[in-house]
Amino acid sequence: MFRGWIIRRINKNEKFSVIIVPHDIQKTRTYKISYMFFYVFVGVLAVGIVGLTIFLATYGNLLLKAREIVMLERQVEELTRRNEKIGILMRDLAELNVMEIKVRRLLGAARGDTTWTAGATEAGETGTQEVENEKTQMLLAFPSFWPARGHITRGFSVTSGRSGPEHHPGIDIALERGVPIRAAAAGYVIEAGWDDTYGYLVTVDHGYGIKTLYGHNDRVVVVKDERVGRGQTIAYSGNTGTSSAPHLHFEVIQNNISVDPLKYLLK
């Protein structure tokens, strides 16, 4: 602690003295400083203060811009996520349109057929709602969802008859063991268990005369009479039954007749 300091000019043109009086010491201290050094020191100090002020102002602007950039990046990420969701919705809508066309063709209804709306013509809004519900149920029952994605090692073939060596009422999809097998459409499980040929299998009834069969599974995770949704996991791939490598045997059965699953599955 100091009691204070006193500046006493010694020479007008050369130097001045700075006398420091300590708080607890009686002896004072005197420092002689040239005016040139003092002016240089003050100038450097002033430049430093100005530079520091400019730096703080610039740094503050940079912080604000950095914060704006972060906010813009977050907005871009949010817009990107929204665009992805919109893209998924548009893809799903396109798939539904394709499904409707396939349903019409496979169930014998032409694209311009009025059977979809006949009830609406007679019953007004109530009929329209019933028809729309019927269309929705048929689309949900349409086995268009791939039970698993993989290389098709064997295609559909019934040209040689049910007992011929080339007879194959479904498609085989090569998979590693333990891959989730999902229901191709909504429906009820009518069979879930062991079969000497297909090993652990699941058969789902989707209504409208359509059934799907999933064979050679490692294990089954649904039970008979259970309601399953489109895309729900019903089993895990394996190599059970008459099988030489892990894969899924997938069948589509319409009115008790095996049909090519690729006519139903969406690309």
Image: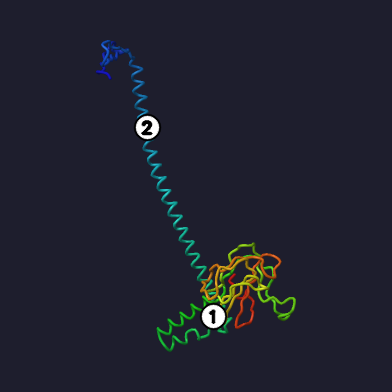
- Give the residue furthest to the right: 165
Residue found at x 73% / y 80%: 163
Residue found at x 60% / y 72%: 193
Viewer-nearest residue: 174 or 16: 174
Q: Could you tell me how far apart the alpha carbons at marks 2 and 1 are, in whole angstroms?
A: 79 Å
Q: Position of residue 46 (x, y in %)?
A: 34, 27
Q: Position of residue 103 (x, y in %)?
A: 55, 79
Q: Which mark is residue 52?
A: 2
Tag 1, which secondary structure?
strand
Which quadrant of the structure image shows residue 217? bottom right
Type of amino acid at the residue the image marks with label 1 = Gly
Viewer-nearest residue: 23 or 51: 23
Type of amino acid at the residue the image marks with label 2 = Leu
- Residue at the disc numbered 1: 207
Q: Position of residue 68 (x, y in %)?
A: 40, 48
Q: Position of residue 47 (x, y in %)?
A: 36, 28
Which label lies toward us, 2 or 1? 1
User: Is 80 located above or below residue 183 in the figure?
Assistant: above
Which quadrant of the structure image shows residue 129? bottom left
User: Is 130 located above or below residue 6 in the figure?
Assistant: below
Tag 2, which secondary structure?
helix
User: Is 133 located above or below residue 58 in the figure?
Assistant: below
- Say whether disc 2 or disc 1 marks the residue closer to the N-terminus: 2
